[in-house]
């Protein structure tokens, strides 16, 4: 993170003081298409909280950094020594302007108002789900979903995964499609034996799998 190395000595002086608030310098790119999962780089001034053990001469730094875009929590993929937080925003945000928020492990936050703008995207005409055979509760299995229609092979967005009432599927948001195809591990739990998985996207397209046995 930007100050992690350069403030190694000042950390001893700041350990008993209030830590300064983080500052977001920039968000790159500042714009994404609604239909395309996008890697985001948040360049921030991060003074990380630390616990100093003077008897041992050690400093324990809390490196936890989380990112939120609007009301959506997005994963922290990496934090560079220069303070650049890498994340990926899935294609589940409607077109509009969204604040970008960074939160450190001790609760200090920085917000960049309107840091990310989502513009209209291009969605496939629909989806098809490869046949699913019998599965076991809470045991991962491979789900394959294919975008269909014109331009389907170029789709690199995400879909939501759903099941019926009294059932759960994880994850709730898929990984990005690759060349119009999604292949990923999912886990299903349900009190019912007959199960189906439904995929939906932000544009309102819906596809439902065959009914399969969940044991």
Image (cartoon, rainbow, N blue to C red):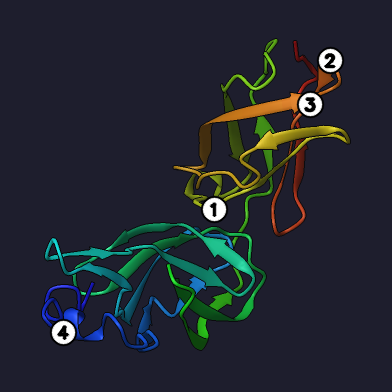
Question: Viewer-nearest of labels 1 and 4?
Answer: 4
Question: Viewer-nearest of labels 4 and 3?
Answer: 4
Q: Which of 115 and 31 is in front in this view?
A: 115
* Label located before the other in sequence (3 or 1): 1
Residue labelled with disc 1? 157
Residue labelled with disc 2? 193
Give the left or right position of residue 192, taking residue 7 as reference: right
Residue labelled with disc 3? 196
Question: Viewer-nearest of labels 3 and 1?
Answer: 3
Question: Viewer-nearest of labels 1 and 2?
Answer: 2
Disc 2 to disc 4, how far (Cα)? 61 Å
Disc 1 to disc 2, how far (Cα)? 31 Å
Is residue 2 shown above or below 199?
A: below
Q: At numbered mark 3, what does the secondary structure look like: helix, strand or loop?
A: loop
Indicate the quadrant where residue 140 lies.
Answer: top right
Indicate the quadrant where residue 174 lies.
Answer: top right
Residue labelled with disc 4? 10
């Amino acid at each position: 993170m930007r100050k992690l190395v350069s403030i190694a000595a000042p950390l001893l002086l700041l350990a008993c003081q209030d830590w300064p608030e983080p500052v977001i310098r920039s968000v790159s790119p500042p714009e994404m298409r609604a239909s395309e999962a996008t890697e985001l780089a948040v360049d921030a001034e991060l003074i990380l909280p630390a616990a100093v053990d003077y008897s041992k001469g050690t400093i324990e730094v809390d490196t936890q950094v989380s990112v939120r875009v609007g009301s959506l929590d997005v994963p922290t993929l990496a934090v560079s020594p220069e303070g650049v937080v890498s994340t990926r925003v899935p294609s589940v945000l409607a077109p509009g302007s969204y604040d970008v928020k960074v939160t450190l492990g001790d609760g200090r936050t920085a917000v960049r108002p309107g840091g990310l703008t989502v513009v209209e995207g291009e969605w496939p005409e629909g989806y098809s789900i490869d046949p699913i055979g019998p599965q076991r509760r809470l045991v991962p299995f491979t789900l394959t979903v294919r975008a269909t229609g014109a331009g389907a092979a170029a789709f690199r967005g995400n879909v939501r995964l759903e099941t019926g009432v009294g059932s759960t599927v994880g994850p709730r948001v898929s990984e990005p499609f690759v060349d119009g195809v999604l292949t990923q591990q999912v886990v299903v739990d349900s009190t019912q034996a007959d199960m189906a998985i439904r995929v939906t996207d932000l544009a309102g397209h819906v596809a439902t799998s065959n009914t399969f046995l969940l044991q």
